Amino acid sequence: FLRKICHMYGLGAYLADLAKKSHRYVTPEQKNGRLEYTLVRCRVAFGNPLMIDGTLVEPGAMHSFVGCQDPTSVLVGQTQKYQITGHDCFFVKGKEDQFQRGVSVYNSEYIMFHPWQILPVYLVRYVIG
């Protein structure tokens, strides 16, 4: 039921703490004359996340990351330093008023690189209106 597939910050599972962020990536199904949406609510083991609060130097700069690699060379304005001992996931801080399409996100998101960090708990089906 995913509509858009993108990996702006690498090849991982993208999660959000706001349902409105996740809702933008869901394709509704027609049921009984109404559009029904489905989201999965999960528990997540973040471990040691790296907060990304900078912007990408260009769209696609982290597109091919296959793990929680050091993103320092592809970010502008990054404040948290990458620890040599590593990180388990990315927390990308939403820019809201300073959002720039293609190089930042409006709402915050989390990128997990290991499937065992995510435990699906609830399947939520909903209609709007």
Image (spheres, grey):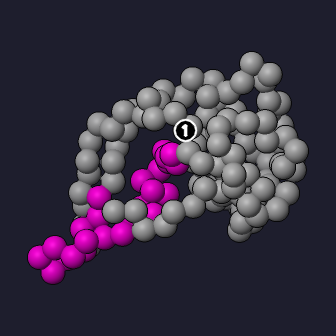
Residue ID at (44%, 29%): 116
- Quarter of the picture containing the N terminus is bottom left
Please identify the quarter of the rendering in which residue 106 is found: bottom right
Q: Secondary structure at mark 1?
A: strand
Horizontal side, residue 117 vs residue 73: left or right: left
At a point 51% along the width and 63% down the height, the residue shown is 5
Which x, y percent locates residue 105? Answer: 66, 57
Front-most of residues 72 and 93: 72
Quadrant assignment for the C terminus: bottom left
Bin the neighbour count of mark 1 within 10 Å (Cα to Cα): few under 14, some 14-19, many 20 and up: many
Query: Where in the figure is residue 128, as x and y percent of width and height?
Result: 28, 69
Q: Is residue 100 left or right of residue 3?
A: right
**Residue 27 placement: quadrant:** bottom left
Q: Which residue is mark 1?
A: 112
Residue at 73% from the left image edge and 42% from the top image edge: 52
Decide if residue 78 is on the left or right side of residue 31: right
Q: Is residue 92 at least partly visible in the picture?
A: no
Residue drawn at (51%, 45%) of the image: 13
- Hey, what amino acid is under mark 1? Met
Residue in front for this viewpoint, 74 or 20 = 74
Q: Which quarter of the picture shows residue 127? A: bottom left
Q: Is residue 34 magenta?
A: yes
Q: Is residue 18 visible?
A: yes
Residue 41 colored in magenta in the image: no
Task: Provide residue 81's location: percent of width, then percent of height.
Answer: 83, 30
Give the percent coordinates (x, y) of residue 72: 85, 40
Residue stretch rendered in magenta on the structure: 13-38
Q: Residue furthest bottom?
A: 33
